[in-house]
Image (cartoon, grey):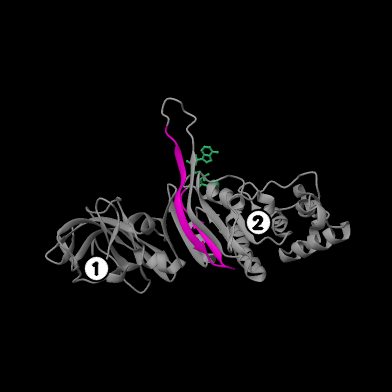
Amino acid sequence: MKVTLKNLTKIFPSRNNKEKKNVVAVADFSFEIPDGKLIGLLGPSGCGKSTTLSLICGLQKPSSGKIFFGEDDVTNLPPENRGVGMVFQNYALYPHLTVKQNITFPLENLRGKDKLTKQEMAEKALEAAKLVQIEELMDRKPSELSGGQQQRVAIARALVKMPRVLLLDEPLSNLDARLRLATREEIRRIQQATGITTIFVTHDQEEAMSISDLIVVMKEGVLQQIGKPQEVYNDPCNLFVAKFLGTPPINVFEGEVKDKKLCIGGAPVMDADLPDALVTVGIRPEGFIVDENGAFEAGLDRVEVMGRDISVIAKHPSCETPLFRAILNGENEVEGERIRFTLKPRKVYIFDKESGCRIEVK
Ligand code: ADP
Ligand code: MG
């Protein structure tokens, strides 16, 4: 099911009578989620991710704008008529119910022609349980399950009605690191097995990058960029997106374009056919090449060996942070107090100093 958001806006009125400042949780959001894809909705805490999901599932009404499932305008449909499955940030299972009862719960309230017999409910519950591989656990209570198993029950409960759209709000946040990794693969597998259009909300860029067909990056309620994970990483539209994607993060420097050269700390580090201006420069950690004749000179702080690669931690007076990080092939030998690099032009991004917008070098 294709999902289209058109100029979706949600404004929460201020509770603070003195300030009278409304919160714009989602601002003029427009994008199309293709049928059968997994979308990672990504942004820092408070940027409006959960609000966006609530609007899509119908728990909240937009202040303006429209939501379409396929060609149907669902903006005014109540949640139960939208055909969405949702796993909430705190995926509270009913503690007094068994796994099976938890999964069948959404089916109990079906009325009229949709009403199911006990037998049909049991079959559907088993089908959903099989998808998330918990069919052995049907008679347990949530307290008798691990975090990862509880998570799967919550997903099975969201899947049991075979929703048209599956919404997952930070579904891995309560799991430990290992389980997060395994469960995100699992979510990807389930999504591909069912082909259900899925929106996966997270503040963890690595999580979103690793399993999404498309990522949507948002900041303070405003859509920043949408695209395939690698495309957004390679081609960020602004400094915020560049900083938000990538571990270790991009290194940021003050720079200047002068006489068609990009200069950092006065040294010309790269050709840049642009008008003279003060700029902000982002260099990905993998953008450095050790070169004794390189124009980019830095003070060497230390080297961390990480097996195949080494991480060179260095300092530069124009860097936004006290130290920056270059990731190099482990065959490089790095020592001494100073180090020189040449830069890989495709890993260097130039941004407008005021707006943070990317300035593309032709
Ligand atoms: P995220 O899920 O990205 O962390 P949210 O969608 O929960 O962000 O919140 C976005 C913004 O809207 C925040 O500033 C939050 O404080 C505000 N907000 C969310 N829900 C409400 C509400 N019911 N009333 C008022 N403000 C809200
Ligand atoms: Mg949230």
The amino acid type, in three-letter code, at marker 2 is Val
User: Left or right of 266: which side holds 102?
Assistant: right
Is residue 116 rendered to the left or right of residue 69? right
The residue lying furthest to the top in this view is 18
Q: Which residues are magenta?
A: 21-44
Q: Which mark is residue 361?
A: 1
Prevailing SS of the magenta stretch: strand
Relative to the observer, which residue lies in front, 233 or 1? 1
Amino acid at circle 1:
Val
Residue shown at 47%/28% (left/top)?
16
Which element carries disc 2, helix, strand or loop? strand
Residue 144 location, x and y as percent?
77, 50
The residue that label 2 is drawn on is 84
Asked whether residue 138 appears in the rendered view, the answer is no
Q: Quadrant of the N terminus?
A: bottom right
Q: Which mark is residue 249?
A: none
The answer to which of 137 and 93 lies nearer the viewer is 93
Q: Which of the two labelled residues, at mark 1 and mark 2, occupies the earlier sequence position?
A: 2
Q: Quadrant of residue 250?
A: bottom left
* The one of 85 and 323 positioned closer to us in this rendering: 85
